[in-house]
Image: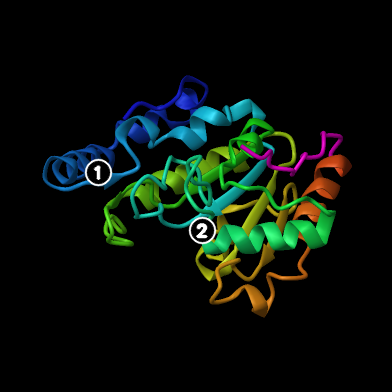
């Protein structure tokens, strides 16, 4: 597991801490015994696809997808050819209502990451078919450090916190400098309780434009 170069100055100290060594040992032991998602090369894809200097939006997820061939290191995103998961289906519905985007035939969100949306889960690995199996092993400490590094950026960033888990990170964000967009989570369990109708995508673009940055083209291309 190798931290992408643009992030190294901000995370190098974190990777030297004892907890991170223990975390790496834990993940290696899990991989030796079980199937673990995403593959080793994809664990830091959120950081790879969105270099530090490009991170203008921080979308926080929770746990990687735990079924075969889904997780590839970006929260909410799945590999090409994999059915769109329920939370992402609801995101697409809201995106259509909010900005008129056509619902695409895939759940591959790399084009968002390429435009500066850091799509990071709080936990970056999971044992196959066992949700939250790598919770509490150290990933949360590391991803909090990523969040703090983004919070330290001089220019304004848009933080998107969907659901109670993500909203617990609010104390780590300087809300006097950054924009925070909060609502219910898009999961089928909660989307009707405040995600649908929250218009997060147009709000993100408005905040970016107010900061003198380019808006996101949210349309995911068909594959």
The answer to whether 18 is drawn above or below residue 192 in the figure is above
Which mark, residue 85?
2
Where does the magenta region start and end? 211-223
Lower sequence index among marks 2 and 1: 1
Residue at the disc numbered 1: 23
**Residue 128's spot in the image, x, y percent?**
27, 53
Give the dominant element type of the magenta stretch: helix, strand or loop.
loop
Q: CA distance from mark 2 to mark 1?
A: 28 Å
x and y percent of residue 65 in the render? 40, 54
**Residue at x-position 26% and y-position 44%:** 19
- Determine the secondary structure under disc 1: helix
Front residue of this view, candidates 186 and 156: 186
Q: Up-down: is 183 above or below 74? A: below
Residue 67 numbered mark, or none: none
In which quadrant will I find the C terminus?
top right
Q: Judge by depth and name the residue closer to the eye, 208 or 79.
A: 79
**Image-based side of 73 in relation to 6, left or right:** left
Residue 64, percent from left and from top: 40, 52
Q: Farthest residue in the left direction?
A: 33
Query: Which secondary structure lies at badge 2?
Result: loop
Q: Is residue 6 left or right of residue 21?
A: right
Q: Residue at x 46, y 33 (%)?
A: 45
- Give the mark count: 2
Q: Quadrant of residue 38?
A: top left
Pointers 2 and 1 in contact (C-beta within 8 Å): no
Q: Percent from the top left, x then y, of residue 69?
A: 37, 44
Question: In this picture, is 207 found above or below 163?
Answer: above
Residue 121 within the magenta-colored segment of the rendering: no
């Amino acid at each position: 597991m190798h931290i992408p170069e643009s992030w190294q100055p901000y995370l190098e100290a974190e990777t030297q801490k004892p907890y991170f060594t223990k975390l790496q040992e834990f993940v290696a032991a899990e991989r030796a015994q079980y199937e673990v998602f995403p593959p080793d090369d994809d664990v830091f894809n959120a950081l790879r696809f969105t270099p530090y200097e490009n991170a203008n939006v921080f979308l926080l997820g929770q746990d990687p997808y735990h079924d075969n061939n889904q997780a590839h290191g970006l929260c909410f995103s799945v590999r090409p050819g994999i059915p769109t998961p329920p939370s992402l289906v609801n995101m697409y519905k809201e995106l259509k209502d909010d900005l008129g985007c056509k619902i695409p035939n895939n759940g591959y969100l790399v084009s968002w990451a390429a435009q500066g949306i850091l799509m990071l889960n709080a936990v970056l690995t999971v044992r196959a078919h066992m949700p939250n199996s790598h919770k509490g092993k150290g990933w949360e400490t590391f991803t909090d450090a990523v969040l703090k590094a983004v919070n330290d950026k001089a220019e304004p960033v848009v933080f998107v916190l969907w659901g109670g888990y993500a909203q617990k990170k609010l104390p780590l964000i300087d809300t006097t400098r950054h924009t925070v967009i909060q609502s219910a989570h898009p999961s089928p369990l909660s989307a009707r309780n405040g995600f649908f109708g929250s218009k997060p995508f147009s709000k993100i673009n408005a905040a970016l434009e107010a900061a003198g940055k380019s808006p996101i083209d949210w349309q995911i291309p068909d594959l």
